[in-house]
Amino acid sequence: MNVIAKVLHKTDHILCYFHIEENVKPKCITDCRVKAKPSDAKIVDKHVKEANDEKHCENDKKIVGACRDVVNYPTEDSYAIALLKFIEEVCGPFPIFVKYVETTVFPLKKHFMRAWTNKFLHLGCRTTNIVESAHAQLKRYLRSSVGDLASCWDEIDKMLKNQLGEIQGSFGRSITVMVHKYKKHKLFSKLEGYVSRAALSFIDEELQRSR
């Protein structure tokens, strides 16, 4: 981020909200523990412990879910209302966790919260999952990290040929079948037969977001 700010200071960039959430979860588990009652603390009973653990788990899910809702609100006004509710109602009993999200997570809001990221083109890509999915697929083809150059080259070539076949098949369906909602649209009618349906869907989402 420091390099982007110095070299490409006019460029809008997005942070992966999935990994931000993954960083929030362990802090939630450690900082948002529901304290047992004094009378219960002395009971060393398996069922009581399981009940307390279940209560902690449900509490963590509630907080992480509320945090996810704050991230996905589409406008700054709705974000502000949701943030106030999140801090005062959902996380009120856990000041340490509130301090963590206020000083570490929310200052970066313009880079991963929908209310801000919707203001510029990203074609629905708000996480690094696409890249990681491609990496995982490559690892499945390679099967081993100690292969020689020739065997790795053959496996990568096989993977790319399969991907090319899937892409060509997708284009073939796009040429012969047009989604009904695109047929009478001036923008999409010019692209019929030239752009895949997946690409048209991305363009349509950006168009709806810009309105």
Image: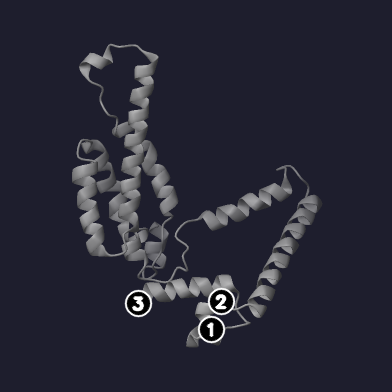
Q: Residue at x 50, y 86 (%)?
A: 184
Q: Are marks 2 and 1 in contact (CB under 8 Å)?
A: yes
Please state the horizontal and vertical placement of residue 54, each as a whole percent of the image. Answer: 37, 28
User: In terms of sequence position, does the residue under pointer 2 or pointer 3 come before the other?
Assistant: 2
Q: Amino acid at mark 3?
A: Arg
Quadrant of res 64: top left
Q: Give the SS element for disc 1.
A: helix
Determine which residue is flagged by label 2: 179
Residue 29 lies in what quarter of the image?
top left
Q: Quadrant of residue 42?
A: top left
Q: CA distance from mark 3 to mark 1?
A: 20 Å
Residue at 56 percent of width and 76 percent of height: 179
Residue 137 vs residue 206, the one in the foreground = 206
Q: Residues within 10 Å of mark 3 (few under 14, many from 20)?
A: few
Residue 179 lies, with reference to residue 150, above or below; the image says: below
- Would you say residue 126 is visible in this rendering? yes
Residue 65, percent from left and from top:
35, 46
Measured as percent of width and height from the top left, residue 87 is found at 21, 46
Q: Nearer the viewer, residue 25 or 202?
A: 202
Q: Give the vertical position of 52 relative to 102 (above or below).
A: above
Type of amino acid at the residue the image marks with label 1: Lys
What kind of residue is marked 2? Val
As drawn, the label of residue 211 is: 3
Residue at image location 63% in from the left, 76% down from the top = 174
Residue at numbered disc 1: 183
Q: CA distance from mark 2 to mark 3?
A: 21 Å
| Image-based side of 100 in relation to 178, left or right | left
- Position of 156 relative to 39 (above/below): below
Q: Secondary structure at mark 3?
A: loop
